[in-house]
């Protein structure tokens, strides 16, 4: 039994049926970063609160999660809990701040295996349930407020992407520290990746226990690795998560949930990503839908994506054209195997009405 009694039954389970590989009536759709700064109501609800303060307040987090569901009523087929991938480094004992207009900042990033911080992070026994209790409270509260309108997605960052943030101390264009870790201290990097992976499994399992009905692992920096270093520093840990989450859920008396992996920029490894044990593989816009379908072959993998988010800066005619191209490419073999999304998140500069048009075009053209 995954469902706590107080949750209403789902009125729209299209995305779950699609993720499990069933034939469906149309393509379900949700959007990465569908909640956030491009929505005026986000700024209003957030007020003067700091970003992580919003994540830590279940009432605020659930309000922000529901905003796109309410604005785009009937056009989104899933909600994603308002939280961040960087709550895991925080749970592991690191300080992370969100600096306005700059993004995340770690005042004390991990510098080398012999700085005291690394030792501390590696030694710390992480009590995930206690540290991230606010995420689970937000999920349970959001499930109640959703009243079964659409399923709720939980998520975490992939070990490789989290390592990048923990050693860089924030965003970067050159990945100097991350590359130093893998090329100078590969064993220490692998030990850290393993430790992060274990926290990821626990965090995902507890999100499902709290009410998440599907999960996504975001490997936003997968594209910074070469095919061979990706195999060594990212894939084994993505595989660790997909291998250990289902038995962990079983042990906790919970039903399995569909798992999505999004390894942005790692399209050269798409064939092996299709073997990682996830039901759904998220695609960025650098891979053509028909090409991805060819690489998938007859494996029962569902794709998610993948229009260039930049189409939302363009005309409605170009949005329609892009959606037609995706429908043709992904639906080559019938109305299954595709969850609509963009190839990455919406940006603060996009107009909600243009996103609405994209959502309605996927709906219209995929059911035709
Ligand atoms: C890399 C990453 C992060 N966080 C996340 C990723 C993976 C996805 C991706 O690749 O974009 C994931 C994430 N972050 C957020 C969500 C919430 C749910 C949703 O998708 O709507 C999710 C799923 C909220 C957020 N996370 C963040 C915001 C903006 C916060 C604000 O300034 O109000 C939101 C709404 C902040 C954040 N958090 C992070 C960064 C780099 C930033 C700053 C980015 C920027 O300035 O655009 C780390």
Image (spheres, grey):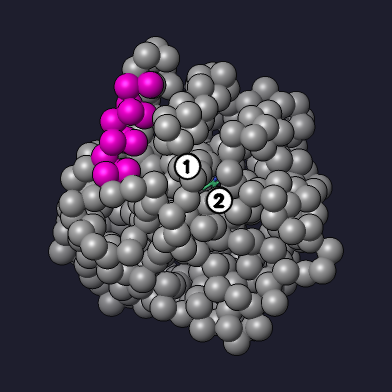
- Is the residue at mark 1 in contact range of ligand 1, meaning its CB lies under 8 Å from it? no
Q: Which mark is residue 14?
A: 2
Asked whether residue 60 is drawn in magenta, I would say no
Asked if 103 appears above or below 300 in the picture, the reply is above
Residue at image point 71% right, 33% down: 70
- Per the model, the C-alpha gap separating discs 1 and 2 is 8 Å
Residue 85 in view here? no
Relative placement, left or right, of 109 versus 63 is left
Disc 1 or 2, which lies upstream in sequence? 2
| Camera-nearest residue between 90 and 357 | 357
Q: Magenta segment range?
A: 320-332
Q: Which mark is residue 26?
A: 1
- Element under disc 2: helix
Is residue 321 or residue 242 the one in the foreground?
A: 321
Residue 194 lies, in percent from the top left, at 40, 76
Give the percent coordinates (x, y) of residue 286: 24, 39
The residue positioned 23% from the left and 49% from the top of the image is: 292
In percent of width and height, residue 125 lies at 59, 81
Figure quadrant of the C terminus: top left
Task: State the mark number for residue 182.
Answer: none
Where is 340 relative to 324, above or below?
Answer: below
Q: Verify CB contact (< 8 Å) between mark 1 and mark 2.
A: yes
In the picture, the quarter occupied by the N terminus is bottom right
Classify 10 Å Cα crowding around label 2: few (below 14), some (14-19), many (20 and above): many
Ligand 1 within 8 Å of the CB at mark 2: no
The count of marks equals 2
| Residue 279 shows in the view | yes
In the displayed structure, 101 sits above or below 278; it is above
């Amino acid at each position: 039994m995954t469902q706590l009694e107080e949750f209403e039954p789902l009125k729209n389970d299209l995305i779950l049926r699609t993720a499990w590989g069933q034939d469906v009536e149309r393509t379900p759709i949700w959007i990465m970063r569908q909640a956030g700064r491009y929505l005026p109501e986000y700024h209003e609800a957030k007020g003067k609160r700091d970003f992580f303060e919003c994540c830590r307040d279940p009432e605020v987090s659930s309000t922000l999660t529901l905003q796109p569901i309410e604005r785009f009523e009937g056009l989104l087929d899933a909600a994603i809990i308002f939280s961040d991938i960087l709550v895991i480094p925080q749970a592991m004992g690191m300080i992370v701040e969100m600096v306005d207009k700059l993004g995340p900042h770690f005042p004390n990033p991990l510098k080398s295996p012999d700085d005291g911080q690394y030792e501390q992070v590696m030694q710390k026994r992480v009590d995930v349930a206690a540290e991230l209790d606010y995420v689970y409270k937000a999920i349970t509260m959001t499930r109640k407020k959703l009243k079964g309108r659409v399923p709720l997605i939980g998520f975490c960052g992939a070990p490789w992407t989290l390592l990048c943030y923990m050693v860089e101390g924030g965003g970067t264009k050159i990945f100097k520290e991350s590359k130093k870790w893998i090329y100078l201290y590969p064993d220490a990097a692998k030990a850290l990746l393993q430790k992060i992976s274990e926290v990821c499994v626990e965090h995902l399992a507890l999100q499902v226990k709290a009410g998440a009905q599907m999960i996504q692992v975001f490997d936003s920096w997968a594209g910074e690795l070469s095919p061979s270093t990706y195999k060594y520093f990212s894939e084994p840990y993505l595989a660790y998560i997909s291998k250990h989450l289902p038995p962990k859920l079983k042990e906790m008396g919970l039903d399995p949930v569909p798992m999505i992996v999004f390894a942005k920029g790692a399209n050269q490894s798409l064939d092996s990503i299709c073997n990682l044990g996830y039901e759904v593989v998220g695609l960025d816009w650098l891979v053509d839908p028909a090409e991805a379908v060819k690489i998938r072959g007859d494996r029962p993998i569902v794709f998610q994506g993948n229009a260039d988010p930049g189409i939302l800066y363009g005309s409605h005619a170009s949005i329609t054209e892009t959606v037609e191209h995706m429908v043709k490419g992904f639906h080559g073999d019938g109305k299954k195997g595709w969850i609509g999304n963009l190839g990455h998140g919406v940006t603060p500069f996009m107009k909600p009405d243009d996103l609405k048009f994209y959502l309605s075009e996927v709906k219209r053209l995929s059911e035709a």
